Image (cartoon, rainbow, N blue to C red):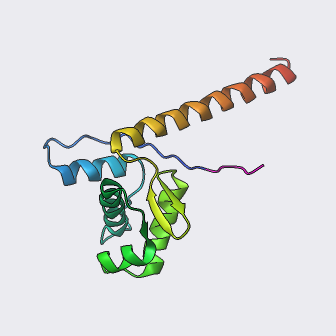
Amino acid sequence: MSIIHQRITIMRMRKPNTHDVNDELQFLGNSLGLFNLRDKDKSCFRVFIELLKAAKRKQPISSDELAFRLGLTRGTVVHHINKLREAGIVVHEGRRYFLRVDRLENLISEIRKDLMRTCDDLESIAKDIDSELGL
């Protein structure tokens, strides 16, 4: 049996006042804890955008292709892909990567389901522990 580890980070952020798609994408990624201040050249954001474009084309993309398109090293791309995979947003098939779902709205829906399953598991375990402790 394989164990799935997924790190989901949700941060309460102020929504952008404008309807600028780049600001809204940045808000989405920041709210999911994907992009941080240490990423000065926004390379994780850029990797995410390229994966989003690939999803729109319905074509998985390799880390080499991402590195070439973005002018980044393959190591940098792999680092960010691994972070996105850990968050459950990106999956891989062979040597190619793609977003877990083809639309951002569906992505948020899937994350919600993941969170609810995790909360249900935690609640069940807490109930068992309470019972064993006589609480």
Query: How far from the left and from the top, in percent, is residue 61?
Result: 41, 67
Q: Residue at x 34, y 69 (%)?
A: 43
* Left or right for 81, reference 116: left
Viewer-proximal residue among 104 and 42: 104
* Left or right for 46, reference 134: left
The C terminus - image quarter: top right
Main SS type for the magenta part?
Answer: loop
Q: Is residue 90 above or below residue 123?
A: below
Query: How far from the left and from the top, in percent, is residue 127?
Result: 75, 22
Q: In this view, does 90 lie above or below 114?
A: below
Q: How many callouts does the rendering have?
A: 0
Is residue 4 on the magenta stretch? yes
Query: How far from the left and from the top, in percent, is residue 8?
Result: 52, 46
Look at the image and give the residue range highlighted in magenta: 1-5
Q: Residue at x 51, y 33 (%)?
A: 113
Viewer-proximal residue among 89 and 26: 89
Q: Which residue is drawn at 54% across and 62% down?
A: 93
* Left or right for 38, reference 118: left
Viewer-proximal residue among 38 and 64: 64
Is residue 123 on the magenta stretch? no
**As drawn, which residue projects farthest toward the top?**
135
Query: Residue 122, located in which quarter of the rendered image?
Result: top right
Q: In this view, does 66 lie above or below 89?
A: below
Q: Which residue is drawn at 42% across and 63% down?
A: 60
Query: How far from the left and from the top, in percent, is residue 86?
Result: 55, 56
Viewer-proximal residue among 52 and 122: 52
Query: Residue 44, located in which quarter of the rendered image?
Result: bottom left
Q: Is residue 13 above or below residue 88?
A: above
